[in-house]
Amino acid sequence: MNHCGPLQVFQRAAVGPFAHLNLSRNPFGELTRETRGELAVVSEFQFAGWLERLNSGDRFALQFIGPSGHGKTTHLLALRCHLARAEYLYLPEDGPQPRVPDARPLLLDEAQRLSKWRRWRLMHGRGPLVLGTHADLSPALRRYGWEIETVMVTTLDSAERTLEILNRRIEAARAGPGDVPCLELSQAIRLQQRFGGDLRSIEQFLYLQFQQLAWEQATWPLVI
Amino acid sequence: MEYRYPFKLATATWPPTYYGTYLSVSHYVHVRASLPWKFDTKGSAEYLVVATQAPDDLTPTTKKNEAGIATKIILGTLGLVIGIPLLFLMSFLIPIVLIIGGLYWFFRVFLPGRITGKVECELASLQLKPGQQVTGSLVFTPKKSSQINGIIWKLMAEEVCSSGSGSNRTTHRYQLVNKVEKLMEARQLVAGQRVELPIDVMLPANAPPSLKFTDNELTWSGELRIDIPGWPDFVKSFKLVVAPSNSSVSLGDSTSSREFDDFEDDEDDEEDLTEEARGDTATAVANEAMTGVSDEGDVAQEILAFDEVAEQIQATQDDPDKLMLIVEAVQGLDFNVRADLQGRMYQPPAGVSADGGQWSLARHRSTGLDMCLLWPQGTDSPRGTAFDWEGTITVLGYDTEHDRVIARVK
């Protein structure tokens, strides 16, 4: 329980183009990796299970599979927030691949891009590993004696979860006490009908919608 | 029980607050109450920063840029070691590169040159300020008599922002300004007859400054085009740098330290600002104070008239009856003012109807008096902050709740 009341920095007037929505910025702008991890919406039950296994299993690999924009990276970043010694590594599509660190647990994003040699070394090494990948790496991992849990991120798509993710983003941009815009389930369903489970596309769409709200002085609710 | 802790902080001098479509720059004060054995309580508030001078290269310090010389030497050496053998191996590419380069030269330089002859086109300065004239000259002597559709100057400003990385990397572009001006109408060029054309076009008064960050930038550019019908045009592009406007400013008026002056004693404002934050601005202010001369003498006379009103309003802020007498006396009168526009207001001031234009929050330059300015529909209203805006206002009333003058821009 927090014994301190709300802490405010007093201003003469709220500033910025989103002040009329009680927001300090566009809620769907680019976030730092740290903030993305903090705002991730994950099932607490599942999450606790993953953390337990990652903290105990040396040859354990948790892989998140799915197409772009469905939350693989966000899951990795959320796990990083709870794994004190974990290191996150993103493998770029082009250019030289960065050195794979020795730290464990290792959170490896776009793991399908590992070169054969690096993959071989990784699988001969120790764990635990958390992999974000477009291709299923479990057959190879199993061959080298790894225990694997695979999470298909597309199965996590639901309108309720999408709604929670989007409203959490809006809440994180809150400027001060009072109401902030809030999306409704019907809007989340319409967004899913339009973009499927591609959260990145939904967020890009909402970014432009909020920009429009700011520049045109339009008021909430958003027409989707 | 409520506790209040007054504080003062020096602001950064760069970058200024900017609200764009893909690119926004905001400055915040974040506070945290550190509670032993409990979750810390946090709060934050945004404040506006109006810059008075841009860094020389418009490149804020980043890790990438700091790496500078060492990285360049390593990359240069690698380039030589790998590049030269690669050049031999890929020698079949050289003719293709030469052909592409040759075609570019042929269509962009040689063919227009057959009509226009050698074109000399220069701008007096590539570093500009909002509202400043872009000056230069265009001189050429046509080789052939021919018709042109005109000579066109195009001014462009664009936000270029990249997000994601690798295959997910996306570049977003938003054009802020795309202003086309015809410097010369369609006419017949006569072979051997020299054409001299002065370039004299104005940058918008509310032009946002050029910004450059690691993945995001706001760029300004100009393009001069001799439009030749049925023939490749002569085109010359200029990369422009727009610096923040007028540097003759009081730092206290323009920066965030004022945003929190509910807690402040104005007399010691200057003492509490660090040397770093003062920067060149302080020098500019000192120079103006010592000479006592303003660049725009006549304008200053008119501003004094509103200065007196503003001073009277400030002096009577604790005496509502006197204050309202002054406001009633000046209601409906026009004044020339200079103010810093601090951003759009999305709600009109209390007691004012919501329709009929766009509202901006402004601060009177010489007194620091806050104002709510209404830009009627159809006027060229600013999109965000603007520094040292000058114009005529009609006083409409006074917002007693927030101590600010309500006025309409003419």
Image (spheres, coloured by chain):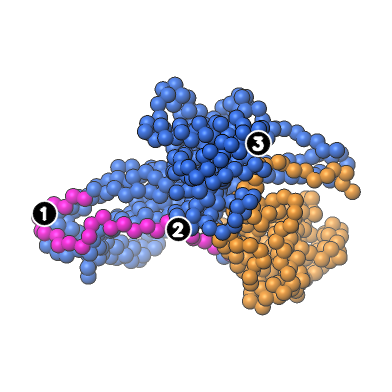
Chain colours: A orange, B blue
In this view, B185 is above or below B59 = below
Magenta stretch in the rendered image: B168-197
Question: Residue A73, position in %: x, y?
Answer: 69, 62
Question: Residue B158, position in %: x, y?
Answer: 45, 56
User: How many C-alpha atoms fall within 10 Å of the one at disc 1: few (<14), some, or many (≥20)?
Assistant: few
Label 3 or label 2, whichever comes before in sequence order: 3
Amino acid carrying label 3: it is Pro
Question: Residue B320, position in %: x, y?
Answer: 65, 36
Label 1 or label 2, whichever comes before in sequence order: 1
Which residue is drawn at the image coordinates 63% and 72% (left, top)? A224
Main SS, magenta region, reads: strand
Residue that carries the numbered disc 2 in the rendered image: B378
Residue A45 or B78: which is nearer the viewer? A45
How much space separates mark 1 and mark 3, taking CA atoms?
72 Å
Residue B193, label in figure: 1
Amino acid carrying label 1: it is Gln
